[in-house]
Image: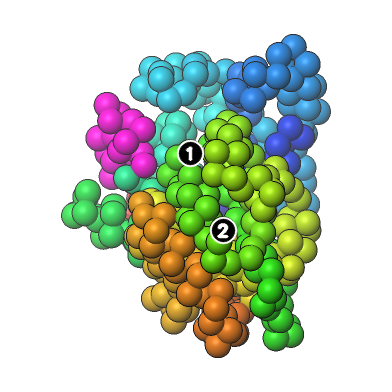
Amino acid sequence: MKVLQISECFPTKYKPQTGEFILKHVSALSKLCEVKLIAPLRFIPPREALLAGYSGVRKWLSQINETEGMSDGQLSVEYMNYISLPRPIFEAIDEKLINTLFRKKLYDLIKAFSPDILYCHWLRPWAGIAASISKELGIPFVIDHHEDLPTMKILFPNDYSNFLNTFLLADMIILHSNENRTDLQNEIASLNNIELIYLGQSFEIFENDKEFSNDNIKLICVSHLHEPRKNIDVLLKALALLSDKLKFSMRIIGDGPLKSDYEKLCLTLNLSGVVTFEGSLPQDEIKQLLDNSDMFILPSFPEAFGIVFAEAIARGVPVVTCKGNGGGEELRLLGYPSVLADPMSADDLSEKILALANNIEAKNEMSSKGRKIAEENFTWERNALQTFDMMTELLNQFHNRGNVRN
């Protein structure tokens, strides 16, 4: 079987951590079949490069130009350069521009590989274009959807119905949590071609019983700081309510345009002495920080899933999140006693953190169950095998319906 995947979210020299999980996915899948990944590389400076001025743009351009494809066994990666308009302001026009200027380039790359299945991560902006190409070539089309629909509805009110229509073009849709599946089926009740496949996580399972601190509780949060829905402001306000009730320190891993706002909020809340913003870090450093933490907290809402939850439980760190969070709710369905707070209530979140901090039995139970659940459900090998089995069945059904490859 030959599978061609498309993902704009993929590591580059400029952002080596971005899309690491897609690289893990295709690497594991390539052990079972031949995989080519096309990573569209957008030639427009990101906001952080523009804010840094000439030096920032120069660094971005240099590292983007240094980004090269790769080949490893049955896996090959090719970057496809393109230009587009600023998003999300020109979202609808942008997709039309890309379709006009770069569809043929993508079509030629796909046809040259001659895949059995075309597989696109995310809807925007490539899924609609890829769907039309799959129909021309007479091959099945898969959408692997990683975003939460409520956020898309808020960000793109004028384009949301078009995004939903794109799902109708897919022969199979992969989602990663029951929460996300419920959201999609509430929007399109007729969809019956949805497969739930868990993502993997890259950390080894923590083998020993985890020891928890009783005097200075070490808290950790791993999240990009691009969107308000991550609720970092709610987290900081909850920590401020704990300042006279609990001795703690908090490390926030991740970067983004909202970082300066959160740093200012820390000053306002007198949290600068206990909250540290570490910026983006490589995976090995994140693992070390998780191993030295007593609690992982990310009250993001809405959230499709969140691999960081699987990474935290793999290292035995108890997870605190919020109701309606795809990751926290999914872990509960698997038997993990997720601590779920009201996503909009700093008071409720602070109470949940304090209660868990003072309950060593609960922390031990969460650590033990979490490691077992991560080992059984969140590995890239399992993700690849389930994806391969799904595609094999899809290909058989596609051919049995009399579809002929062009």
Q: Nearer the viewer, residue 376 or 121?
A: 376
Q: Position of residue 102 (x, y in %)?
A: 52, 21
Looking at the image, residue 61 lies above or below residue 201: above
Looking at the image, residue 87 lies above or below residue 390: above
Tell me the amino acid under the disc marked 1. Glu
Tell me the amino acid under the disc marked 2. Ser
Residue under pointer 2: 243
Q: Is mark 1 on a helix, strand or loop?
A: loop
Q: Nearer the viewer, mark 1 or mark 2?
A: 2
378 on left or right of 27: left
Residue range in magenta is 151-169
* Residue 253 lies in the magenta-colored region: no
- State how the image is colored: rainbow
* Residue 156 lies in the magenta-colored region: yes
Look at the image and tell me whether residue 228 can be seen.
yes
Q: Which of 286 and 16 is in front in this view?
A: 286
- Residue at 67% in and 77% down: 214
Looking at the image, residue 75 lies above or below residue 406: below
- Residue at 35% in and 60% down: 342
